[in-house]
Structures are given as C-alpha cells and as structure tokens.
Amino acid sequence: MAERIPVAILGATGTVGQRFVQLLDGHPWFEVVALTGSARSEGKPYAEAATWLLDTPMPAWARTMTVLPTRADVVTRAGARLAFSALPASAARTVEPELAAAGVWVGSNASAYRREPDVPLLMPEVNPDHIALVERQRRERGWPAAIITNPNCTTTGLTVPLKALAHAFGLEAVMVVSLQALSGAGYPGVPSLAIMDNVIPYIPNEEDKVEWEPRKLLGSLRGDEVELAGVTISAHVHRVPVLDGHTLAVSVRLRTTASPDAVAEVLASYQAPEATRDLPSAPRPVMVVRHEPDRPQPRLDRMTGRGMTTVIGRVRPDPILGIKFSVLSHNTIRGAAGGALYNAEWLARYLGWR
Ligand SMILES: NC(=O)c1ccc[n+]([C@@H]2O[C@H](COP(=O)([O-])OP(=O)(O)OC[C@H]3O[C@@H](n4cnc5c(N)ncnc54)[C@H](OP(=O)(O)O)[C@@H]3O)[C@@H](O)[C@H]2O)c1
C-alpha cells in the first residue's frame, strides 16, 4: 500500500480538533505528523494541553505529541502536505493562506474563506465538481496549493436533503428552525449557568451563514464561477442543552408539487455522485428516513452511519410551504471534522494522490 499522506491538525486541542484526532486514528490514507494550538498549549504534550471530551480514549500516538505553534513554517517543517484547520476564523484568516502559499493544502472548518469566489465550499455528496475552483485559486493567487472549506455545521445538515429535493423537484423557498448542540460552540463554550434549563434564541452570525452557504453549495459551476442557487432561505437558530447533534425543523416550497411519500422516497434513495461514493469517510447511506412519529432524536440517532449519515423524520404536509420534515446531523462529525476529512479524501483523489 502507498505511504500515508502526512497531515497536520491546526487547533487540535479544541472541540473539532479532538474529533480530527479521533477520526484520523488509523485512517487508511492520512497520518498525523503535527498538532498545533494557541500560545496556551504550545510546547505541552497533547495529553496535557487538551481537555479530552470524547467517549473513546485519546489515541496513544497523540498523547505524547508536543503541541506546536500554529505557524506555516512550523507545519511545513513537520512535513505536512495537508493541514486540517479547526481554528477560530480570526486565526484561520492569517495562517491558512500562508500555508497554501507554502505548498500545504488546507481543509478548513473556519468561515474565513467560505465566501471567496475562488475557494470551494464543498460537500462531496452534494457538489464535488466545485473542487475545480482550486485551479482558479492557485492561478490567481500564485499558490502551489489551495484552501478548500466545509460549510457551517447547521448548513451541512440542511443542505443534504435540500440537494436531493432540488434535484428531484426544484426548490424555491426554505424555512428552517435549528436546535443546536453545545459542542457547536467549542470548548469551554456556553457557560453552564446560561444553558442548563434553558434555550438561547441567538448564535452570533449563524443565521446569515445558514441563509447563504446552501446557495453556494447548491449553485452551479459555470466556467470558474459558482452561480448561487436561486432559493430563498429563512433561518431561526437556537442553542439547546444537547451535547452533540443539531436538530432542524425544515419547511420547503418545491417547484413541482410532491406528496410526503414521494419526498421521503427521494430522500431515502439519494446517492452521492459516483466518484465520491467509495471514499473512506463517505456517509453510508447519505440519508436515513425514519418513520416513527418521534424520531430523529439526538441522543438516539446522532451516530447513525458513524455520525456521517443525515437522519430525516416526520415528512408531512406543511399548510404554508407544502412539505415539512425534521433533520438530525452530527455537528462535530458530519458537520465539522468528518466533513473536512471527506472533502480531503475527495481532494486527494482529485489531485491523483490516491
Ligand atoms: N464545533 C462545531 O461543531 C463546529 C462545526 C463547524 C465548524 N466549526 C468551526 O471550527 C473551528 C473550531 O471550532 P471549535 O468548536 O473546535 O473551537 P474551540 O473548541 O474553541 O477550539 C479552538 C482551537 O483553536 C485554537 N486556537 C484558538 N485561538 C488560536 C490562535 N489565535 N492561534 C492558534 N490557535 C488558536 C485553540 O487552541 P488552544 O486550546 O491551545 O487555545 C483550539 O485548539 C471554528 O472556526 C468553528 O467555527 C465548528
């Protein structure tokens, strides 16, 4: 078997960084050669720097790795060809272009570059063709490598069913109410005194992301421009006392009328484009449609398909927009580290590395 591709995790001590460490343990294509953090963690062994929050043990190889400063020269010296970024957007804005300019490919979770016209915002089961934007990015910026991004975690869960519906029936308008898990706010995140026994109807900048990002993901690549999808989206977001798994209540107006049974059938049978179906992190299946009246539920259903499958339930008529349903998506797996890994696998195939 070919040697594994050396990768770095930027922001490895945080909520998403830890998921990367967990999901990259034993990954068939990638091998972690560097973990980075902020000045708080620099120079410490990973086991000391990270407050491990996951229910599988910290991998032995990670425990003793020294947390490095988040700098392009350090990551390059460690030999990484690809860097997974789990940095806050402010830190990502500086270091991600420096890495791409130094020849290290970047798979970013941060929002810093998602809206740039030459940066792919990618989900391999939705818009794998948008990867071609990296050619424009390298040409126009003069970089040997490029940045690819995955969407916001709420956008991720919403866009999977929207893609299937847009393809089958056409899509005009979407109304979404989110119930978002605490892990989406990072660590230490929302203070316990603010969230226990409570719901907070505000997450900074989130509604704007959920109303815009699906339009790029569902948009068409024309030459080296993405034409945004002409769908109107309205989002109401809430933080709720759930650890992992974002729940969405979604109503849609389709271009052609469809019954709830026809919608459920389209969602359950949706497949990723052929080229991305067999990647190691591909969701299997892309969506599951549950028929019980009280599912999906985060505690019971978030690990469906190793946390990569989007779970749908309660497909029914909506008296205003036509159709409504519930969605559950694991925010730190499909919505963050797992999604970035799936993107990087698609990039590795696109570049001929695998
Ligand atoms: N949580 C989710 O579900 C989710 C989903 C999709 C996207 N995202 C995005 O993913 C990114 C990470 O989110 P998170 O929830 O994992 O956040 P987090 O738990 O707060 O972790 C942030 C990480 O970045 C490091 N860091 C912070 N400031 C830094 C700086 N100035 N320079 C270098 N490193 C710095 C931290 O290192 P230290 O521990 O050493 O301070 C930590 O490793 C964010 O951009 C977020 O918006 C998160």
Image (spheres, rainbow, N blue to C red):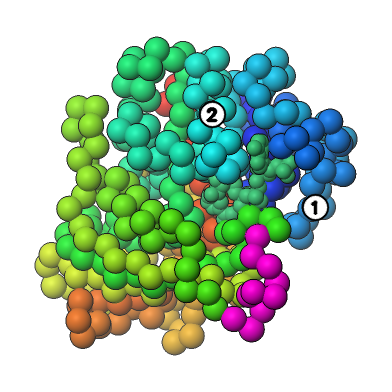
Q: Residue 51: which numbered mark, if any?
A: 1
Q: Residues within 10 Å of mark 2 (few under 14, many from 20)?
A: few
Looking at the rendered image, the disc whose residue lies closer to the viewer, 2 or 1, is 2
> Does residue 23 appear anywhere in the picture?
no
Pinpoint residue 251: horizontal percent, then vertical percent: 29, 74
Q: Nearer the viewer, residue 305 or 180?
A: 180
Q: Is mark 1 within 8 Å of ligand 1?
A: no
Residue stretch in magenta: 189-198
Q: How many marks?
A: 2
Q: Position of residue 81 (x, y in %)?
A: 59, 21
Residue at 29% x, 66% y is: 234
Disc 1 on helix, strand or loop?
loop
User: In the image, what residue type sits under mark 2?
Assistant: Thr
Question: Could you say whether the residue bearing mark 2 is in a helix, strand or loop?
Answer: helix
Residue 191: in magenta span: yes
Q: Earlier in the sequence, mark 2 or mark 1?
A: 1
Looking at the image, which is closer to me, 263 or 70? 70
Residue 283 seen: yes
Establish whether ligand 1 lies closer than 8 Å to the Cβ of label 2: no
Asked if the residue at tag 1 contacts the one at tag 2, i.e. Cβ–Cβ closer than 8 Å, the answer is no
Disc 2 marks which residue?
94
Residue at 20% over, 81% down: 320
Please say whether residue 285 is one of the residues in the magenta stretch. Answer: no
In this picture, is 42 found above or below 333?
above
Q: Amino acid at mark 1?
A: Thr
Task: Please provide percent x and percent y for residue 160.
Answer: 37, 57
